[in-house]
Image: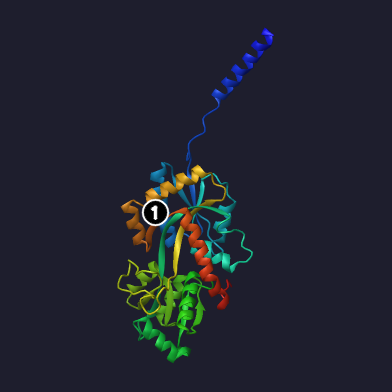
Amino acid sequence: MKRILNYMSCLFTLAAAGLAAQPAQAAYPDRPIKLVVPFPAGGTTDSVARFIAQELSNKLSQQVVVDYKAGAATIIGAEYTAKAEPDGYTLMLGTATTFAVNPILYPDLSYDPIKSFTPIGIVGTTSLVLLANQKEPANDLKTLLDDIRKAPAQYSYGSHGNGSTVHFAAEMLWSAAKVNVVHIPFKGASPALTNLMGGQIPISFDAVPAAATALKSGRVKAIAVTGPERASAMPGVPTVAESGFPGFAMQSWFALVAPKGLPTEVQATLESALKSAMSEKSLMEKLANAGLEPKFESSADYVTRVKTDIAKLEPIAKTNNITRN
């Protein structure tokens, strides 16, 4: 019996020694973090991502590296992120296109905006702007709509392309105003603005950053912004709501997400770091200069935005046959 007890004692001693020898699990994060951007380098989302990455690197004491996975209306980057290991080392900065528009326009979309991701938080919004060529006589929305009703054949509008957020914003406005305006989709913001400034189209919609730059040319003018409040980058331009359509609001927004299944403690670390980063005045100024209305919103707010936007935009898509083509 004594031998058995001694033997068992040895086993317990060895087991304890083995457990003690196990290396302690490193605290998150212990290596660089990848921040996926589902857009090409050089645009507004790129700028926002680099500013966020820099401040998160400071807060997490670990480098956050921007990684571009552009293409297919942000689907390539979103798919990549959704399939990545949920360990906190792959994040993505997506937009309303990724999380609200694509689920409407692609019935067989390979990801779900809620089921495929763990939200970290929202970093800001940007309004869209109704622009007109300087030769267009109207300077306000009411006059422009009156002119369209008098001579609808003379009007068309440009957008970034079929199914873009600016396409949705335009059709929301035309539906509210009960007018029909021919849509001319371009392959991106740049050609739409070029044609607007050149007078090939009389009006167009664009995001605040691009619109603010275009206004400096003196060849276009801003008629109204689509957000619930005036854009800080162009405070003299009224909202659509102020211009006769109370309650009208359409914005794009930027959200940080991780793959679904992220450990709760890692999500909490990232959300806390993002919230802290968004309290830094220097970051807020950089985001504002990039055309955003910077404001931290929680992971719960992300879910609310996704559901609200899809419910609002889906009827617009069906009524106006908006598709990606």
In the depicted structure, whether residue 255 falls above or below residue 131: above
The residue at the point 50 percent across, 79 percent down is 184
The residue at the point 48 percent across, 69 percent down is 165
Q: Seen from this angle, which residue lies furthest top?
A: 2
Q: In the rendering, at what x and y percent does residue 284 appear? A: 34, 56
Q: Seen from this angle, which residue lies furthest bottom?
A: 150
Q: In the rendering, at what x and y percent does residue 19 appear? A: 57, 24
Q: Mark 1: few, some, or many residues within 10 Å (few <14, many ≥20)? A: some
Q: Is residue 319 visible?
A: yes
Mark 1: which secondary structure?
A: helix
Q: Is residue 42 visible?
A: no
Q: In the rendering, at what x and y percent does residue 70 appear? A: 53, 60
Q: Amino acid at mark 1?
A: Phe
> Which of the 4 image quarters holds residue 217?
bottom left
In the depicted structure, whether residue 210 falls above or below residue 303: below
The quadrant of the picture occupied by the N terminus is top right
Q: Which residue is mark 1?
A: 51
Q: In the rendering, at what x and y percent does residue 236 appear? A: 30, 73
